[in-house]
Amino acid sequence: MQFAVSLGQFLGSQRDTEVCVFYGKYITDIESFCHQLERNVPGPFLHRRMEGIGGIADLLRQRASFRGRPETKHRFYIWHDADVMLRANHRLFGRIVDAISGIAAEAEYVSEDLLLIHRAIYVGSSVLDVYAEDPKGQFQSWDDDGHDEPFWKVVTNVERPLFLRYRIDCLGPDVGPPPTTDRR
């Protein structure tokens, strides 16, 4: 918890950056995830679904703009205790990870809008490490949506999402936060 809070404070101090914090201890289903997403990303009414107008993916694409303030250039999602959702519903967890990673790739490789770099940090128990080892999990592959090729692969032409793994308990007191580039 201390690591994730410190990292969030560090990232939040960067220029043109917003940090969205998800308290995973309270996220076990789509309703509880949407509840926290609504409080982090301003936008229109959020329907409790992944796709479509007003769904999770649609809201993740939104960027709030405020008069007199520069546009946000970086958005970091820090999901504390992400393993809680993974244990409660691994399929939904994978679909949410897929949406966040897909929106990140879409923003960088496809969108003609002003670039908004999305990065997600999933903090939790060793269950996340086990999930990361699964070649069919969304830390290693796009979600199999039942079509010939996964949606995000077709849209972005990116073969698979890119993730880096760190063991927080191995970081010494003199080591700063892990690199945040190329992290989805």
Image (tube, rainbow, N blue to C red):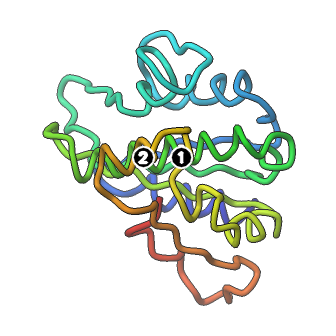
**Which element is circle 1 on?**
helix
| Residue beneath disc 2 | 102
Could you tell me how far apart the alpha carbons at marks 1 and 2 are, in whole angstroms?
Answer: 6 Å
Q: Residues within 10 Å of mark 1 (few under 14, many from 20)?
A: many
Q: Which residue is at the far top? A: 45
Where residue 38 appears, as percent x and y from the top left, is: 56, 23
Q: Which residue is at the far right? A: 88
| Residue beneath disc 1 | 98
Instruction: Tell me which amino acid carries mark 1.
Output: Asp
Q: Residue at x 32, y 30 (%)?
A: 63
Q: Are marks 1 and 2 in contact (CB under 8 Å)?
A: yes
Where residue 120 appears, as percent x and y from the top left, is: 52, 54
Q: Say which mark, if any, is on residue 71.
A: none
* Vertical position of residue 133 compared to residue 7: above or below: below
Left or right of 119? Residue 126 is right
Left or right of 47? Residue 25 is right
Q: Residue at x 63, y 25 (%)?
A: 34
Q: Residue at x 55, y 38 (%)?
A: 146
Instruction: Tell me which amino acid carries mark 2.
Output: Gly
Q: Residue at x 62, y 17 (%)?
A: 48
* Vertical position of residue 65 compared to residue 125: above or below: above
Q: Residues within 10 Å of mark 2 (few under 14, many from 20)?
A: many
* Vertical position of residue 87 compared to residue 33: above or below: below
Q: Which residue is at the far front? A: 148
Where residue 150 appears, as percent x and y from the top left, is: 46, 46
Where residue 98 appears, as percent x and y from the top left, is: 53, 46
**Which element is circle 2 on?**
helix
